[in-house]
Amino acid sequence: MTALDVESLRKDFPILERTVNGKPLVYLDSGNTSQKPRQVIDAVREHYERHNANVARSVHTLGTESTAAYEGARERIAAFVGAPSAAELVFTKNSTEAINLVAHAFTSASEDPRFRLGPGDEIVVTEMEHHSNIVPWQLLAQRTGATLRWFGMTDEGRLDLSNIDELINERTKLVSVVHYSNILGTINPVELLIAKARAVGALVLLDGSQSVPHVPVDAAALGADFLAFTGHKMLGPTGIGALWGRYELLDAMPPFLGGGSMIETVSMTGTTFMPPPARFEAGTPPIAQAVGLGAAVDYLAAAGMDNVVAHEKALVAHALDALTSLPYVRIVGPSDLVDRGATISFTVDGVHPHDVGQILDDDGVQVRVGHHCARPTCVRFGVPATTRASFYLYTTNDEIDALVRGIERVRKVFA
């Protein structure tokens, strides 16, 4: 495509044809989970109807077809995020598992100095992280005696980089940072953070849960060491995500889980393990889900990620202009289009976000309310929760207008 034909594209998404409470569905919760096009739904259904079998185990026709579909999906997904080799892409069930897989590799007794962590060593994150990129590192610090440090935020919802040289220093072993905030919509300057980490010999993990679905991402070109992302936010099924990692690092990491498929040989006195990525994919993997995610990246590639970016930037411009015209609405996060994605969190004066969400739902408008698994961000901005509207390639300006009308009704109800 040379540009997104959104009206035609929307016909690929069956769920967008339904109503909620007698009103047309207005789905503005894609940051939570995206809707799925027929092409993805059909790919999963066809796999179960015609090719269903376990992978890497059988020489019969169905097993061979299933393995080819699974590994073919891996190749296309790896290419989508700029991986030099499909062997660098590990299937996980989500971003959370991918991040935990990396955290598991760090121990105080690691033979590899890159993964040896103990008292005096430091892990650096940010205050705007999803809980999935905070809690694993807190647990790791507790296990090893390392120290967890973090970047704060400005009032505009951007990283406060004033102390970057203090935070990323010779004691830093890992910098794990969100690429695109799930609550603020902020797109972080990861190139700068990666360069600083490289200068002190630290590893870098990017949480790409929101960035991979919405902007072109080339993890290897960025210079990162690891990239975590999840399928259900990028038109794919639930239960499937991925970790991209530089092969030399994956090859140095211990298994995350033990069982079938990840072994070379097993005896009662010891076991040897497969090379990556099989080493990290114990047991029967999410085969049909991987096939579905492969179809999802095919869909996004055909749409063109640059076109997705352009469409979403226009949506955000329209939404920011409309929301800032309401004097009782406060945007939590960047108020301009600079380094900003298609996610807007806000509060309505005098109305709890859960009440906002319920009234919007009455009008068929689906948004998320709460702290969005980013409670430290809410604490930083002095709010217990926010209402979050998040857009995608199938979102229209008319749907944003429906959101604004719903907020105006919220105000009238609670006036």
Image (tube, helix red, strand yellow):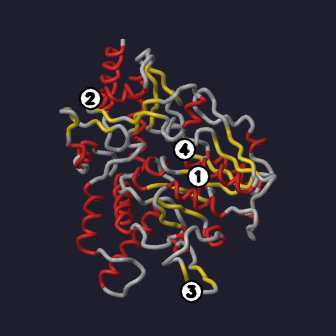
> Would you say the residues marked 3 and 4 are in contact, meaning their CB atoms lie under 8 Å apart?
no
**Which amino acid, mark 4?**
His
Q: Quadrant of the C terminus?
A: top left
Determine whether, in the image, residue 280 is placed left or right of residue 141: left
Q: Nearer the viewer, residue 117 or 203?
A: 117
Residue at position x 35%, y 22% in the image: 407
Could you tell which of marks 3 and 4 lies nearer the N-terminus? 4
Q: CA distance from mark 3 to mark 4?
A: 39 Å
Give residue 265's mark: 3
Instruction: Mark 1 vs mark 2: give the one in front.
Output: 2
Q: CA distance from mark 2 to mark 4?
A: 29 Å
Give residue 362's mark: 2
> Would you say the residues marked 1 and 2 are in contact, meaning their CB atoms lie under 8 Å apart?
no
Q: Which residue is mark 1?
A: 206
Instruction: Mark 3 vs mark 4: give the one in front.
Output: 3
**Coordinates of residue 329 in the picture (x, y in percent):** 44, 20
- Write down the quadrant of residue 4 in the picture: top left
Determine whether, in the image, residue 31 is placed left or right of residue 135: left
Give residue 130's mark: 4
**Coordinates of residue 265 in the picture (x, y in percent):** 56, 86
